[in-house]
Image (spheres, rainbow, N blue to C red):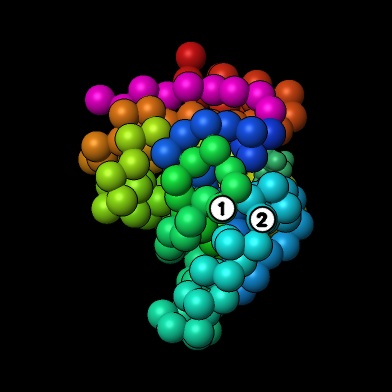
């Protein structure tokens, strides 16, 4: 069984085996949580991301997939980068958002990570309504077949925290 914990705060301050990054497909950094992870984690993360672009992901990391790098100076062993879908009102992209959580846990299992911190993927710059983002996150983690013992959702603001709390209760 995987335990779900909720924390309101900055994910770059968490001590866990793996921190999940809501990256963009370039893997070369961006705003929001991605920028915060690279800032606090330091240049070692970007260096590995550049190598991944040059080797496995020449066209970028596809939406819904996940890949790990070092966590640099973060208090974690790995950063798992996943690319959330941009929210759309004309197309249902929920399966891609669910895939981000599932694939991140699959990569965590490959690494042997037992504690994993997730942000609310796609609910910032990518515009996903936070209540629905929370529903997909919690449902997907609950349904996952994983050896991860603790999933910690780290929510930056109170609205996101409440949205996740409503789903976990
Ligand atoms: P996306 O492009 O996937 O929407 P964002 O980084 O813009 O990614 O936002 C995803 C979520 O991460 C949002 O809910 C945002 O408030 C939150 N967020 C931003 N910075 C941090 C941080 N340092 N720690 C945790 N969550 C964060």
Residue 120 versus residue 84 in the image, above or below? above
Q: How would you rate the neighbour count of disc 1 (Cα within 10 Å): few for under 14, some for 14-19, many for 20 or more?
A: many
Residue situated furthest top in the rendering? 169
Q: Is residue 146 left or right of residue 26?
A: left
Residue 134 versus residue 5 in the image, above or below? below
**Can residue 165 be seen at all in this image of the molecule?**
yes
Q: Is residue 113 left or right of residue 85?
A: left
Please state the horizontal and vertical placement of residue 108, each as a whole percent of the image: 35, 47
The residue that disc 2 covers is 42
Q: Is residue 66 magenta?
A: no
Q: Judge by depth and name the residue closer to the eye, 30 or 42.
A: 42
The quarter of the picture where the N terminus appears is top left
Q: Which residues are magenta?
A: 1-9
Measuring 68% from the left and 34% from the top, which residue is drawn there? 10
Per the rendering, the mark at residue 72 is: 1
Residue 61 versus residue 31 in the image, above or below? below
Q: Are marks 1 and 2 in contact (CB under 8 Å)?
A: yes
Q: Determine the quadrant in which ligand 1 lies.
A: top right
Which comes sooner in the sequence, label 1 or label 2? 2
Main secondary structure of the magenta stretch: strand
Please state the horizontal and vertical placement of residue 53, each as a whole percent of the image: 52, 79
Q: What is the CA distance from the residue labelled 1 to the residue labelled 2?
A: 6 Å
Q: How would you rate the neighbour count of disc 2 (Cα within 10 Å): few for under 14, some for 14-19, many for 20 or more?
A: some
Measuring 69% from the left and 47% from the top, which residue is drawn there? 40
**Can residue 93 be seen at all in this image of the molecule?**
no
Q: So how many labels did they put on this image?
A: 2
Q: Judge by depth and name the residue closer to the eye, 154 or 88.
A: 154
Q: Is residue 7 magenta?
A: yes
Please state the horizontal and vertical placement of residue 122, each as a whole percent of the image: 62, 51
Please state the horizontal and vertical placement of residue 17, each as a whole percent of the image: 42, 39
Measuring 31% from the left and 29% from the top, which residue is drawn there? 149
Measuring 58% from the left and 43% from the top, which residue is drawn there? 74
């Amino acid at each position: 069984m995987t335990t779900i914990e909720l924390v309101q705060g900055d994910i770059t301050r968490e001590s866990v085996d793996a921190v999940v990054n809501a990256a963009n497909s370039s893997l070369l950094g961006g705003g929001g949580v991605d920028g915060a992870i690279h800032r606090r984690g330091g240049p070692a993360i970007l260096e590995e991301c550049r190598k991944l672009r040059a080797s496995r992901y020449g066209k970028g990391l596809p939406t819904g997939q996940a890949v790990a790098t070092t966590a640099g100076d973060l208090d974690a062993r790995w950063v798992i980068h996943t690319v959330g879908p941009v929210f759309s009102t004309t197309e249902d992209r929920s399966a891609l958002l669910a895939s981000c959580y599932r694939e991140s846990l699959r990569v965590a299992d490959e690494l042997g990570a037992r504690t994993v911190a997730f942000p609310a993927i796609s609910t910032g710059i990518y515009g996903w309504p936070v209540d629905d983002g929370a529903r997909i996150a919690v449902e997907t983690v609950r349904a996952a077949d994983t050896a991860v013992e603790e999933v910690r959702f780290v929510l930056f603001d109170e609205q996101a925290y409440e949205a996740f709390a409503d789903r976990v209760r």
